[in-house]
Amino acid sequence: MITLLRRATAVCALGAALAACGTAGPPRAASAPTSAPPSRPPTLAPGPAGLTPVFAHGSRTGGRTVALTFDADMTAGQGARAAAGERFDHPRLISTLRTLKVPATVFMTGRWAEEYPDQARSIGRDPLFEVANHSYSHYAYTRHCYGLPAVPRERMRSDVERAYAALRKVGVPDPMPYFRFPGGCYDRRALRALSPTGVTAVQWDVVGGDAFETDADAVVRQVLDGVRPGSVVVLHCTRSAAPATERAVRAIVPELRRDGFRFVKVSELIGSLSGRS
């Protein structure tokens, strides 16, 4: 009897990891690790009455961060000008951002992506950048917006969706759920029309002033004078319309870094407001 008890005790000692001696079954197979589904990029909650939310800058107290954003503009009617040699792209600017290791958000029109598919795909697949929606052909979403043709209200949603379709078709894998109104012009009608798309409208609090500007120093001064913690700077990614931008960026970046600023994408600024950065 004593011998049997000793044997039972030995078995229990060997099976201590099991739930109970004499009642536990065979060891369970290890569960396969489960990978968490990719998280959706941060967005803002809808505004009053479900209107599309509007984001202009990040937290002023969350650190010295700044987002450089670049509008890659091209309208449906500028194809002939591009065919004649006018350049609406700016590969040297993108190369400079890569060299300086500056993350940035590029707002592309669908028409720009169609004209420069290789560049759109390269930017969209580079983790340094994120690509967002700037409409299909840079038509305004209000009347009287810097002389731009206007998108009828009933076509605003489809214009945004057409732009996303163009971005994905050229190989931009994950365009962000952010939309920049052409010219920055919007009203309640536009915000209501875009609400079903789920986008966050992204404006800015610092105007770079690079559109049609040939003096890079003027752009540098305007940006440096305006930047505050959490700022969103609007610049352009088109050689013909913003010829001084690349030279300005080469001066702006080291100066802001000397002042303690860290460059981030728009998604990080939005995420920091909801604690998701």
Image (tube, helix red, strand yellow):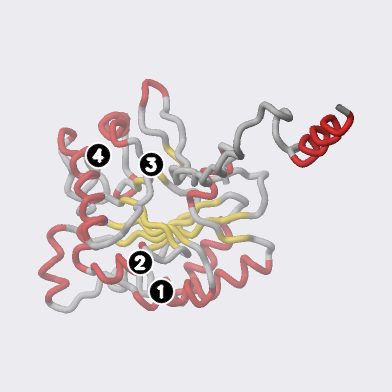
Which residue is pictured at 22% across the width and 40% down the height? 143
Counting residues from the start of the chain, the first of labels 2 and 1 encountered is 1
Q: Position of residue 64 (x, y in %)?
A: 65, 54
Label 3 SS: strand
- Name the outermost residue toward the left: 80
Look at the picture and state if 43 lies above or below 225: above
Query: Toward the viewer: 69 or 173?
Result: 173
Q: CA distance from mark 2 to mark 1?
A: 7 Å
Amino acid type for the residue under numbered disc 1: Leu
Which residue is pictured at 21% across the width and 51% down the height? 165
Counting residues from the start of the chain, the first of labels 1 and 4 encountered is 1
Quarter where residue 200 is shown: top left
Counting residues from the start of the chain, the first of labels 2 and 4 encountered is 4
Report the disc number at residue 201.
Answer: 3
Residue 147 seen in this snapshot: no
Q: Residues within 10 Å of mark 3 (few under 14, many from 20)?
A: many
Q: Position of residue 111 (x, y in %)?
A: 20, 59
Instruction: Please give the residue where the numbered disc 2 appears in the rendered image.
Output: 237
Amino acid type for the residue under numbered disc 2: Cys
Label 2 SS: loop
Q: CA distance from mark 2 to mark 4?
A: 23 Å
Q: How many marks?
A: 4
Instruction: Please give the residue where the numbered disc 1 appears in the rendered image.
Output: 93
Tell me the mark number nearer the camera, choosing from 1 and 4. 1
Counting residues from the start of the chain, the first of labels 3 and 4 encountered is 4
Counting residues from the start of the chain, the first of labels 3 and 1 encountered is 1
